[in-house]
Every structure is written in structure tokens, then in C-alpha cells.
Amino acid sequence: MAILSKGTDFSTGDQVTAANLDALVDSATFAAGAVDNTTTALDSSSPQKIIVKDGGIGTTQLATSDSTTTGVTFAKMQHVASGTVLANSTSSEGDISALTVADTKIIIGNGSGLTSAALSGDATMTNGGAVTIANDAVTLAKMQNVAANTVLVRDASSEGNISAKAVTNTQILIGDGTGFTAAALSGDATMTNGGVVTIANDAVTTAKIDDDAVTLAKIENVAANTVLVRNANSTGDISAKAVANTQILIGDGTGFTAAALSGDATMTNAGVVDISNDVALGGSPTTTTQSAGNNTTRVATTAFVTTAVAATTLTEIVEAPLDVAVVPVSGMIQIPTGYKATSAVAYGYRITVTLTEKNVNSTSSGTALASGSTAAKTNESLGAVSLNFTDVNSTSTNYLHYDVVNFNGFTDEFHGIKVNVEPI
């Protein structure tokens, strides 16, 4: 059905003029029923125009469009405040409205509509969408379930996700450079699942112990009045050996004996030793050698006696009548056993003395030792001549032989000779 009725009705042969064409449109009228007065109506102008009535456009009048440029465009929609979204923020159907969404807020259903709120509590979010979980917010209950007897680790030599690592009975985690190895302690030490570590027997060698590291407090407790010894004649462990009052430890070839001094000597627990009376010393006992010249009741050693004897001059004096001319005289002197002759001095007036070493049973002249002469007496003092020679040791037949003659033909006196001897 035509909406408009033409204003000019042409017949065959009619001339088409401008006026006729204008009348065709200008004189046109709306056909009956062209306006339903529900969705559209005629206004009051002349000529009248078709207008859309308020509420005249319903869902059926709006065409469906899948185009970004047709349909109801954004520009055709009502202006709204900045920072808002169009939503029905009520709990029932109805008109949409502009819901304000401030900085960092999101739209959240609240059961009775929509709420604009920022993330808070365990997580926050920036206006760039970056969500941050608060410290300590991820509880163990919120984590993924894992297999029994496992720990969460990064089991790799690079950063990345963690995983569950199984750790069986008595095992511990050990870094291996590429992650972790679960292994039980072994070798010199083992460990129970209660954390009790046991060092294997004989595992701690001398090289493993630092110098001065084993203090007295680290050594096993022992009974009172004992000392630590190896009480055997073989290598092995030490043990505690009891030492009672006044006892000392004495090696017995198979270990030690604890015994007090007895017999010829006793000792207090302060170390004071007391020698018994009337001790008969056998063998070759020794003691401290006293100082030379000591004249007390102290024990004299052979060294003390030898020194004392050596300090004593043993002499053999051969005398002639005083102030009487003498003829040449000779004699022999025996050297005491264990001694040696070292020098001699002859006394007299104007004499010459010759000393030789000679065997008492020999008729030979012997070995010459020394010779010397004295001058005339002065103020009645005897002259003396020193006779020095190489030491002569004593023997059963070896003697010193002296010959005395007048000096330069004088007839005078010989008063004797003294020989100095020392222990060999």
C-alpha cells in the first residue's frame, strides 16, 4: 500500500512540464492508514509531516546490527559522567545507569547489585592491573596438595617453579649442584629420624682431632684416685689404674703395679722418703759426692776419697846425718799401688841428684827421668832442687831410683827426697 497519493495524475500524451512535476510531489497526500497514530503521527504544519511519536520506537522497530557503524552508535547515546560504566546496579531488572569506578577500583557483584571497590585484604591491584599478594597471605592450606613425606623445593640449578621432593625415613636434603639429593647419613656417621647422630666406632682417627681439642672434661669419668695408663704389655686402650695412699706406679713388665715403698725405704704421701736404720747396701750404690774438705758424718763416695787422697802428698824421705860430710848415696822409692809419680823435690847442701825409673830386679841403669843440683846453704836453710818428669805409674817391680853426689867436688850434706803422687 502506498503511503503517499500522487498530486498529478498523468494521461497518455500529457506533456511533462516542470509545473506538472512539482505538482506531482507538492500536491501529494498521505494515503489513508499511512500513519497509525501509535508509532507515527502527522504534525500540524502545512503541508503536514510524519513524525515518530514518543515511545513509538520499540524493540521491533530497532534493527539488529553487527556493524560498528550502524545501529545505535555510542554518539547517539546519552552523555554520562567521566569514570563511569553503564550498568544496572540494582537487584531487579530495569534501566541501566552510570556507575562510577574510581582509581584502582573494579565492579563487584554484591548480591543486591554492583559495587565499585578496590582490592584489599590479602591482595591489592594497581590501575595497571598488577595484583600484589600481601606478605604471609598465602597460607599452607591455600597451597596445592602434595604427596606424603615431601618438601617443597626448587629442584633445579635455575630459577623456576617449586616442586615436591620426596624425603623418606632418616633421609635429609643435600644440595648436589643441580638441585637436591635426598639421602641418609652414612660412612663415619648415621642419624635416626629423631635427629640422633651416631659416630661409627674407630671413625675418629688421630688426624681428625685438632691439637688440644680433647679437653679433660671430654674424657670419660673415672673412679677416684686413679691414673690413666695402658696397663698391658701391648698396644691398646688406656684404662684407669687405682693408686691408694702412699702408693706409686711401678712397671712390672706386663703393665703397672701400684705399691708403697717398703724394705730399706718408705715414703709418705707428701713424697718424703725415709731410709731404714742399719741398711746393708749391696752392689754398687751411689750418692752425692760431698765438697772437698767436708768433715761431717755425711757418707763419703769413692770420688770424695780419691780427691782427698790426691790432695795429700805421699812422701819418702831419705835422710843423711846433718852437718856431716857424706859420700855418694843411692836409694829406691816404691810408688803406692793405684798411684803415679808426677814430680819430686830433693833437699841438701851442694848436691847433685839424678832420678831414674828402674825395675827393682834389674841390673840395668834404668830410664833417666830428671836431674838437678842445689847450691850452698844460706842462713842454715836447706837447699832444694825440683825434679820434674813424665808421670810414672806404679807396678809391683817398677821403682824410682835416686843417686846423690857432691856438687862441684864439695863435700856436703844430703837431707832426703820427697815424691808427689796422684791417683791413676
Image (spheres, rainbow, N blue to C red):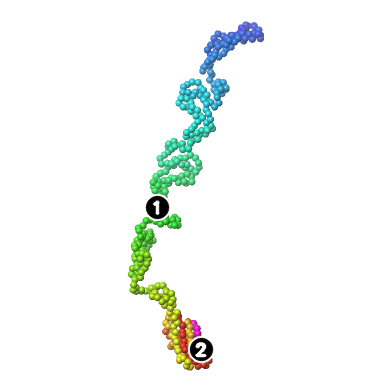
Disc assigned to residue 379: 2
Q: Residue at x 35, y 58 (%)?
A: 223
Percent of width and height locating residue 194? 39, 46
Q: Is residue 364 visible?
A: no
Q: Is residue 379 magenta?
A: yes
Percent of width and height locating residue 74? 56, 23
Percent of width and height locating residue 311? 45, 79
Q: Give the quarter of the figure containing the N terminus.
A: top right
Q: Amino acid at mark 2?
A: Asn
* Circle 1 residue: 200
Q: CA distance from mark 1 to mark 2?
A: 104 Å
- Residue 342 higher or lower than 70, as above or below: below
Q: Give the quarter of the figure containing the C terminus.
A: bottom left
Q: Amino acid at mark 1?
A: Ala
Residue in the foreground of this view, choosing between 169 and 13? 169
Residue in the foreground of this view, choosing between 172 and 394? 394
Q: Is residue 292 visible?
A: yes
Residue 68: image quadrant is top right
Residue in the foreground of this view, choosing between 26 and 334? 334
Of the numbered discs 1 and 2, the one sitting upstream in the chain is 1
Classify mark 2: helix, strand or loop.
loop
Single out the residue that lies furthest toward the front: 379
**Which tag is nearer the camera, tag 1 or tag 2?**
2
What range of the chain is rendered magenta? 373-390
- Residue 342 higher or lower than 269, as above or below: below
- Residue 63 higher or lower than 224, as above or below: above
Percent of width and height locating residue 177? 48, 46
Q: Residue at x 36, y 60 (%)?
A: 226
In the image, taking residue 222 as reference, residue 157 lies left or right, namely right
